[in-house]
Image (cartoon, helix red, strand yellow):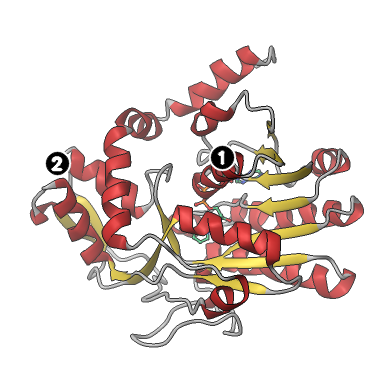
Amino acid sequence: MRTVLVAGGCGFIGTNFVLHLLRTRPELRVVNLDKLTYAGNLENLAEVEGHPNYRFVKGDICDEALVDKLLGEGVDVLVNFAAETHVDRSIKDPAEFIRSNVVGVQTLLVCARKRNVRRFIQIGTDEVYGSLGPSGRFTEDSPLQPNNPYSASKAAGDLLVRAFHKTHGMDAVITRCTNNYGPFQFPEKAIPVFVSNAMQDRPIPVYGDGLHVRDWLYVEDHCRAIESAMERGRAGEVYNIGGGNELPNIELARLILRELKKPESLIQFVTDRPGHDRRYALDSAKIQKELNWRPRVTLAEGIPRTVRWYLEHQEWLGKLRSGDYLEYYRRHYHQTHGLKE
Ligand SMILES: NC(=O)c1ccc[n+]([C@@H]2O[C@H](COP(=O)([O-])OP(=O)(O)OC[C@H]3O[C@@H](n4cnc5c(N)ncnc54)[C@H](O)[C@@H]3O)[C@@H](O)[C@H]2O)c1
């Protein structure tokens, strides 16, 4: 049985990926290593806690002794989602971004090499390419031109992965995706903020003139793309993963308001983010051609599905907004495992 170590499996995409593997790949064992920062929610994975092929380990990817021990137990593939991810937070305080997104990647790479992990998958972002004008798309060969501390730290992590492949011949693949949406996204990111504010008739904050364009990728499509890179990606390659759903933020806000039958008057323009990239769009021809992956969920299907999920999970949303989700780990996990708090 192969073992996949998922780092950062209690965050938004990691949660979806762990659930995807456990639902569709009974021949894989999944170990989830997560530090449980404010963005990690153990309760997301409550339904698989007793799953025979699943194990959770609380820990930091920068903790070399722990990572070495885990990888020494036998890991075939390491998929790294663990990162600080919120651009606004990186502008206020970049230190933690450098630690987790750069030093953390380096620690994983050093230990993976030492313990002969067969494949290393680094989950990257389109933000490393910087900003586009009204036309064109980034390919895997576009220069890296990050414009904020978050994307700069992600670019540094990607470059370390590339260097370990070139220097040590490590089997490593980098994926770079566009903005994800779907279940379990922390309510500091646009879509869950829009939905949860609108549900409570509170204003929806839209940066600047609202004309910043993002390409939206349904998280399930992303999980399938990562799986294909894990299984069939070529070592040393980068694969762009785009949703093919470009939309200005203001249109996204309108779409969500229409879905919730709320008035457009809830839209409130707020001061633009410094260094705010105008447009991101990826050319995904490489992954489509080489790995035969295509996004299946259009925005017309994915937005109603996502809005419905948040409507049906208002308690989940409420706990994250109030901070109560942190209690789950403290009470439930420590009790179940007989651990000291
Ligand atoms: N969400 C998006 O739209 C998007 C787009 C492009 C790329 N990405 C990339 O995908 C990955 C996952 O993004 P997400 O939105 O799920 O993030 P998230 O913020 O929801 O979750 C991050 C997870 O990593 C964990 N973590 C953070 N630092 C850690 C550390 N030092 N050690 C162990 N665990 C740690 C957190 O506890 C959390 O569970 C990130 O690498 C991000 O850069 C995300």
Q: Which x, y percent locates residue 112? A: 83, 53
What residue would you read off at disc 2? 201
Disc 2 beta carbon < 8 A from ligand 1? Answer: no
Q: Nearer the viewer, mark 1 or mark 2?
A: 1
Q: Is residue 76 above or below residue 138?
A: above
Task: Give 47 or 265, whichever is nearer the viewer.
Answer: 47
Q: Quadrant of residue 101?
A: bottom right
Give the residue type at disc 2: Asp
Q: Quadrant of residue 66?
A: top right
Q: Which x, y percent locates residue 83? A: 60, 52
Give me the residue at 29% from left, 56% from top.
Answer: 301
Q: Which x, y percent locates residue 173? A: 70, 66
What residue would you read off at disc 1? 23
Name the image quarter holding the C terminus. top right
In this orientation, does residue 197 appear?
Answer: yes
Q: Of the numbered discs in the image, which one, if any, rests on residue 42?
A: none
